[in-house]
Image: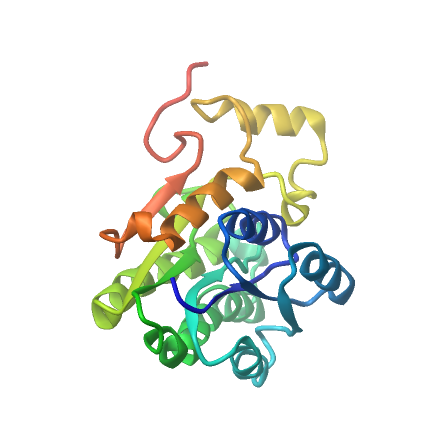
Amino acid sequence: MSGKVLIYGATGGIGAASARALAADGHSLHLTGRNAERLQALAAELGASFTEADVLDPDGIARVTRDAGPQLGGLVFAVGSINLRPLSRLTREDFARDFHLNAVAAALAVKEAVPAMKAGAGPASVVLYSSVAVAQGFVSHASIAMAKGAVEGLTRSLAAELAPKVRVNAIAPSLTQTPLARGVVANEQMKATIASLHALQRLGEPEDCANLTAFLISPRAGWITGQVFGVDGGRSAVHARN
C-alpha cells in the first residue's frame, strides 16, 4: 500500500489501538486528535506524523489532510460520541452536534482525502465507525443511533462511488471499554450487567476493533467493500444465555 494511513480520533481508545495495530503491520501513519499531549506521546511512540485538530473546526479537516501528504493509502475515522439521553432530554443542539461529529465530519474527512487516496499506486481503504445501536433498538440511544445510522448509509454510498480506487467499510462495535465509555461502565455492577447481555459475556476491548481495522486497511481485505461488520460479542445477532 502506498502512502500513509490517516487516523482521526487517534487519542481515543479505539483510535490509539488501531494506530498501534497498523504500525505493527508496517504502515506509516499520520495521526490527528484534540488532546495534544496524548497525540504527541502516541506519535513519538509510533514514529508517526500528527496534526492537532478538532473535526468540528471548519478548517480542521482540510488542514489535517494537507499535513498528511500528497498520497494516502488509507483513512480511519475513529471519532464518536456517547450521548445517552431519553428523547425528552435531547435538544436540537444535541442532535446537530452528534450528527455533525459522527456523520458529517466522516463524510468531509473522506471527501478531502479522496485525491490523495486516488494518487497512490494501489487501492486505498477507508474504515468508518458505526454502532450496534443502529441494528438494535436501545433506550436513550436516539441521537447516537441516528447519527451512526447515517454513517452506515455513507459507507455503502461511498463504496459505490469511490470504487475501484478506494474501498470503504465500517465497523459497528457494542460497548467497548474506552475512555469515552468510562461513565457508562464506572459502576462494576452495571458493567457486569451489560457484559451479560452479550453472548460472549464480556465488554469489548479497543484491540477487538483495532484488529479488524488493520485487516480492512490491508490488501488482505482487497475484495471487501461496502460492508458493516459487527464487533459486538454477538449482541446484534445472538441472544445471550441468562
Residue at the image point whose x is 37% and y is 50% from the top: 216
Q: Position of residue 242 (x, y in %)?
A: 46, 14
Compared with 37, 131 (above or below) is above
Quarter of the image that includes the N terminus: bottom left
Q: Position of residue 91 (x, y in %)?
A: 57, 66
Compared with 235, 13 (above or below) is below
Residue at the image point whose x is 63% and y is 29% from the top: 191
Q: Position of residue 193 (x, y in %)?
A: 58, 24
Picture quadrant where residue 64 is located: bottom right
Q: Nearer the viewer, residue 198 or 93?
A: 198
Q: Nearer the viewer, residue 41 or 33?
A: 41
Compared with 77, 234 (above or below) is above
Residue 131 appears anywhere in the view: no
Q: Is residue 108 left or right of residue 63?
A: left
Counting every numbered tag in the picture gives 0
Its colouring scheme is rainbow
Q: Nearer the viewer, residue 238 or 60?
A: 60
Residue at the image point whose x is 69% and y is 43% from the top: 183
Outermost residue, right side: 37
Q: Position of residue 197 (x, y in %)?
A: 48, 26
Residue 125 appears anywhere in the view: yes
